[in-house]
Amino acid sequence: MLVEVSLRPGIADPQGATIERSLPALGFERVSGVRTGKAIRFSIDADDEAGARGEVDELCRRFLTNPVIEDARVTLAAADQAVRR
Amino acid sequence: MLVEVSLRPGIADPQGATIERSLPALGFERVSGVRTGKAIRFSIDADDEAGARGEVDELCRRFLTNPVIEDARVTLAAADQAVRR
């Protein structure tokens, strides 16, 4: 299970802006729109995919994100097979 | 383009361990193996997918990760369509 927490569009991302500003001086001219966030990976033991997703959605809402300024993207993998929402 | 930077297996992840330790007290008993990392999203202007991937791989190696302790997973999306490595 991968949860990617990113700042919502319109929220200032000074870390991303700093990366973007430095890249041309380092030889990367064609990168734009840099946004940074957090990645959290974990395993969850659930009966089915819907149960796992429900539990993760609640986890995101309550603890992993600040919904005022952040969005969460959840990617679920059963065993070793990736299923993208 | 999404780059997920995570600590390599075997490298201590105190932030992940703290999240994992607190979850049972918060009502989530079935989460395990929590690992945290950074997520960096950006656009790159390249002629083809191989060119974009090459440039991103170099960017990861030189600036976005510390290869001694970190791994990078790169996910490439052309326009709005996701292509996973």
Image (cartoon, coloured by chain):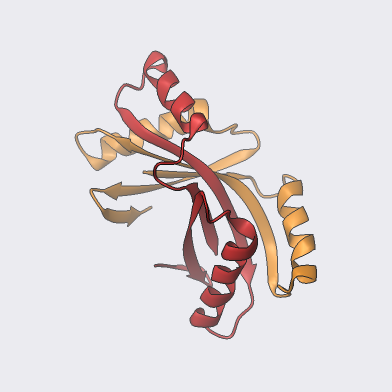
Chain colours: A red, B orange
Asked whether the viewer can see residue A53, the reply is: yes
Residue B22 in percent (x, y) is at: 78, 62
Q: How many numbered callouts?
A: 0
Is residue B8 toward the left or the right of residue A73 in the image? right
Residue A30 in percent (x, y) is at: 29, 26
Classify A78 as above or below A32.
below
Is residue A10 toward the left or the right of residue A6 in the image? left
Residue A67 in percent (x, y) is at: 53, 56
The structure residue drawn at horizontal position 48% and vertical position 63%, both measured from the top left corner, is A74
**Depth check: B21 or A43 in front?**
B21
**Depth check: B3 or A66 in front?**
A66
Asked whether the viewer can see residue B13, the reply is: no
Residue A1 in percent (x, y) is at: 55, 64
Is residue B50 toward the left or the right of residue B30 in the image? left
The structure residue drawn at horizontal position 48% and vertical position 24%, both measured from the top left corner, is A18
The structure residue drawn at horizontal position 63% and vertical position 64%, both measured from the top left corner, is A62
Classify A31 as above or below A3.
above
Residue farthest to the bottom? A47
